[in-house]
Amino acid sequence: MPQNLIGEERILEEVKNAIAQTTGVERESITPDSSLVNDLGVLSLDFLDVNFRLEQVFGIKMARNYVLEHAEELFGEGTVINEDSEITEKGVEILKLRLKEAADGLEPGTPVDELPAFVTPRTLASAVRDILACLPERSPAGAEWKTEDGTRIVCSKTGSPAVFPSGDEVVQRWLRSLQEEKQLF
Amino acid sequence: MAEPYFRDKVALITGGSRGIGAAVARRLARAGAHLVVNHREGRGRSEELAAAVCREAEASGVRAVAVAADISKKEAAQALIARAEEAFGRLDILVLNAARAPFKPWEKLLERDLRLLVETNFLGNVFCMQGALPLLSRQGGAVVFLSSLGSRFFSPDYPLGAMKAAMEAAVKHWSESFGERGISVNAVCAGLVKTDSFKTLRMVQPELDKVPERLFVSPEEVAEIVHFLAGPASAAIRGQTLVADRGMSNRLHGAFGPG
């Protein structure tokens, strides 16, 4: 994002805060690579709370659907998830590209239900960063951006909050450019 | 606080570890009924929440067991009922509260989503009813289904509503099919209730944030109606769906997108 308005560390801090505040998990036990589900005991339904909090903190809209669901929508049912609700080879390929090290241990045949276990504070921070990175150089008023409270980006001239594409749009754009580049499907 | 009718009766609540299900469990326990608290995931916070509901019930003097089962699977639904019989030797009240939904527009529902929709929200309830029937038939009892306004009104990304409508019809059919056995079957159709599920709904329908507080229904208020339908006071009500939405769906204008 322009002028590196919000640093990586700050994003990660806010993600940890959001998890601690919405799930009651102790702040100290949250490390960047803790699996929310396996290490912190967070339920998939609670992810919504975490996302909601992040949306308020950063003024963004987190994705409603998982990467693989978007892939199925774009490339067809059965391409990344098979009829037994397991992730296919192509599904694993996409997830490894998206989650990087966090997807270590992900194999074809992994049940889709186990996917939430791969979500970590780092992967959430990555998702937030991807949305924030869509910020244009200048505001609609032609001015520079500044932050309020260190996390909300507003126009330095009018104070209007920056408007970002939704997390779902960002994922879909990423998938489309991936397809253009790699012709996976 | 125990009421003569409910004392020593046994109630099974699907999805009873949180939200409306937990409120129903608490209400029935206060009335004196023993509980089988069903939840889907047999680990993590879901299990903790179910255990907490059971502990609370036991503190009010009844016995309660938590049983993990995914009711969309017939064997699991049957095992759930079997566990109830094993623990208590009887079943008097079946509260069908568990629901799952893909919150997506109809045109985007994948085959997998559709199967989940039907299997949990329709078939799962049928499996539970079929499993419970022999026990309920022994001494009579009640089945209460938790519906929602999506059964009769559109709201975006809420295909679950169609399953709720199917179930409301089933409630009428079951009422007529099993009434002679002394089994009452009714439903409660709640409006907007602030539970964990509401968080999901609010995400897909952000306009819900504009609904005034006065229109919200508490889980405890819904539980009161379930308690009413599960007991003798509702003897004349058969195969009905009672709407409890603070009147939200009465108005053509100023209605805030019921779901």
Image: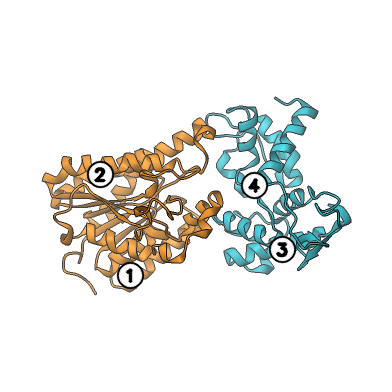
Chain colours: A cyan, B orange
Residue A161 in percent (x, y) is at: 74, 59
Q: Quick one: label 4, few (<14), some, or many (20+) residues within 10 Å? A: some
Give the Cα separation between the discs numbered 4 and 3. Answer: 17 Å
Give the Cα separation between the discs numbered 2 and 3. Answer: 47 Å
Residue A71 in percent (x, y) is at: 65, 33
Which sits earlier in the primary sequence, circle 4 or circle 3?
3
In this view, the residue farthest toward the right is A3
| Three-letter code for the amino acid on which mark 1 is drawn | Glu
Q: Which secondary structure lies at badge 3?
A: helix
- Residues tagged by mark 4 and mark 3 found on one chain of the structure: yes
Image check: A168 left or right of B252? right
Residue that carries the numbered disc 2 in the rendered image: B171
- Residues tagged by mark 1 and mark 2 found on one chain of the structure: yes
Give the Cα separation between the discs numbered 3 and 1. Answer: 40 Å
| Three-letter code for the amino acid on which mark 3 is drawn | Glu
Which sits earlier in the primary sequence, circle 1 or circle 2?
1
Q: Which secondary structure lies at badge 2?
A: helix
Task: Identify the chain of the residue marked 3, using the numbered disc in the image.
Answer: A
Residue that carries the numbered disc 3 in the rendered image: A14
